[in-house]
Image (cartoon, rainbow, N blue to C red):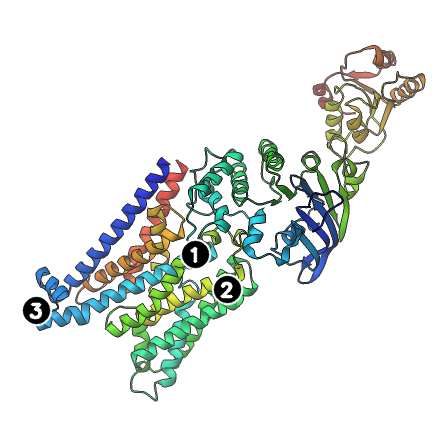
Amino acid sequence: MEEHGKKTLRYALVFAALLLLFCVAVLWNVNTGSVSISLREITEILLRRETADPTAYSIIWKIRLPRLLLAAVLGGALSLAGFLLQTFFRNPIAGPFVLGISSGAKMFLAVVTIALSGLLPFIPVWLTVIAAFLGSMLSMGIVLAFAGKIKNMSVLLVIGIMISYICSAVTEFLINFANEADIVNLTHWSHGSFSAASWSDVGAAAAVALPTALIVFLLSKPISVFALGEGYAQSVGVNVRGFRVLLILLSSVLSACVVAFAGPISFVGVAVPHIARMTLKTSKPALLIPACFLGGAVFCMLCDLIARTAFAPTELSIGTVTSAVGAPIVIWLMVSRRAKREN
Amino acid sequence: MKTDGNTTVNKLELDGLSVGYHGRPLISDIAFALRPGEILTLIGPNGAGKTTILKSITRHLAAISGTVYIDGQNSRALDGKSFATKLAVVLTDRIRPELMTCREFAEAGRYPYTGSFGRLTPHDREIVNKALAAVHAEEIAEQEIATVSDGQRQRVLLARAICQEPEIIVLDEPTSYLDVKHKIELLEILRTMAREQGIAVVMSLHEIDLAEKISDKLVCVKGDAIAGYGPPEAIFRDDFITSLFDIKHGSFHSLTGAVELKKPQGEPRCFVIGGAGYGVPFYRALQKKGFPFAAGILPENDIDYPVAAALAQAVISCAAFMPVGTEQTEAAKRQIDAVNTVIDCGCPMGEYNRANGELISYAAKQNKRILRTVGELSEVTL
């Protein structure tokens, strides 16, 4: 039972660290930007909602807060989507964007943008969101259709990757025949960013992502047995066929939500679940699911901080930062784990 | 309720079961039954459909027709959870979940009993401990399942099944990838489990010799039907196994379970005088070199006899517990006359093999080359 106690302590420490990091990330984000606002002022603005300086008030309430909350919600959603897909494919590099979710969204967005470019002066944000959402659900729908027939996970993974290529090809084809001016919106979207986040974005994203994340958490028991393989899952009474569909559906909704509001953000879905597993040193979904969500939120908030401050006033695209930070972390974790195992 | 003559209810009973894929039957009309504590093993050539039958019992595959009864109930009528409390599986999938300890893997067997978040009660933990103890895996309990050896992993897989507290455990080739020590250990655990907890075991095995020793009942799968069903002593007779596996390049001795390779073809090039196990190394050495040989004079209850019968072109033998007769000695001399080399395996001489001593002297008198060690044999050409 000593082993048990040590583990519990580890879990407690990791979650405490995550919560602490979350608070740090929030405060740091609120406190950083082109306009500097003192910490005391921030506390006042956040807690009492009143201040002498109305500009500071609106910078915080209208720009920084929605942006950081969107980063938190979507980061959590993204890493959870990655976790689900890795569980489903039993492959550590399966992630939402390996499977054509972002390319499906981009293709759909390209179609909508180009089709409507003659009719509308500009593409409204809500339309971008809806188009991207539908596009990612469409590409995942195709993967899902194959998932019913094909039992081999590697084959299914390859199908996902191929769908991603097909979507990219179609997009490139459309862009070739489009006006440069018409696709500004598309280019902007495909860089991925949390900028220009509004409270309504935050609300809509949270309304989709949070309930979905809750459902995922409630499913942690069947997910845990799914990790042993479908054969065992079925033998203890899980309806495997239905559960496969459910897993893909949940991860698609989560990642489609991200793609719709922030564009393609690579690597969070692969890096964060890895980091969560390695630090918690467990495979238990009931622990990993909240850790992934929290970790993803912290990771994205910090990456967004880097994106907007590293080369200020030029803002980096969020995907640039997540890849640059995430990939080395994953390599380091994998290598150190192997090295440990071999000793 | 179905009974099979006795009052004991069969734990598992297959009645006219047809199994296969995509609605096409591969094997039809399968019928067998087993009672609590019995071990039933499916044997048969690769690809015969042993796994298909097991998958149909475990409901991983829908049966095409016929019925599987579990505890007298149609298994199709059971819901997932009650099925899981009656039947557990050990599959061949080579899964290696990352960061999962052997204990956690075994704990997964409590799935049908735990609440909505899979939290284990002290009772659950006790069952897990017992299961780990039953498979001698306490020491590796906290190690990651991905890092333990194949033999250890197989035992943990079994512990998971035991944690499910089933009445039946189905194992698909549990001894594959295991060395002989771990094979024996695993089968011993299964036997103890069956005997002490009354769990009925259905499995498939590649090792027919082990299947004979561990099983109460055997089912031979070949072609589109069951080629044989019964206790091992009824199945392991004469050439049944040889024909079941279509063994053309060797032989299988039903009584000892020994497998021998193909006998060298042609006229005998030497005569081997063996007995009491002294002959076997020479027979095998000759087989490896591809030299056809004759062997003698062996009583039919001699330990050398089955190997000689499998490998020698001719065996001169006498009936069990009977002295060697003149006709056998004469036949042996004729064999010696026909070859240039005689091998004296060094079997000690006693009252009943005096004839063999005479044969060695006879060979020497005839100026035959006499070899006495396997080393010598390996250096000469016959």
Q: Nearer the viewer, mark 3 or mark 2?
A: 3
Query: Can residue B55 be seen from the camera position used here?
Result: yes
Q: Could you tell me the amino acid type at mark 1? A: Gln
Q: Would you identify the image quadrant in which residue A51 lies?
A: bottom left
First along the sequence among labels 3 and 2:
3
| Measured Cα–Cα span from mark 3 to mark 2 | 56 Å
Q: Could you tell me the amino acid type at mark 3? A: Thr
Q: Is residue B9 left or right of residue B343?
A: left
Label 1–label 2 contact, CB within 8 A: no
Does residue B329 sit above or below B156 in this rendering? Answer: above
Q: Would you identify the image quadrant in which residue A136 lies?
A: bottom left
Q: Nearer the viewer, residue B85 or B267?
A: B85
- The image shows residue A16 at horizontal and vertical percentages of 25, 49
Q: Element at badge 3?
A: loop
Q: Nearer the viewer, mark 3 or mark 1?
A: 3
Query: Can residue B47 be seen from the camera position used here?
Result: no
Residue that extends furthest to the front in the rendered view of this protein: B7
Q: Element at badge 1?
A: helix
**Do marks 3 and 2 share a chain?**
yes
Letter of the chain that mark 2 sits on in the rendering: A
| Measured Cα–Cα span from mark 3 to mark 1 | 47 Å
Q: Residues within 10 Å of mark 2 (few under 14, many from 20)?
A: some
Letter of the chain that mark 3 sits on in the rendering: A
Label 3–label 1 contact, CB within 8 A: no
Residue occupied by mark 2:
A159
First along the sequence among labels 1 and 2:
1
| Measured Cα–Cα span from mark 1 to mark 2 | 16 Å
Quadrant that contains the C terminus of chain B: top right
- The image shows residue A29 at horizontal and vertical percentages of 19, 61
**Residue A51: which numbered mark, if any?**
3
Letter of the chain that mark 1 sits on in the rendering: A
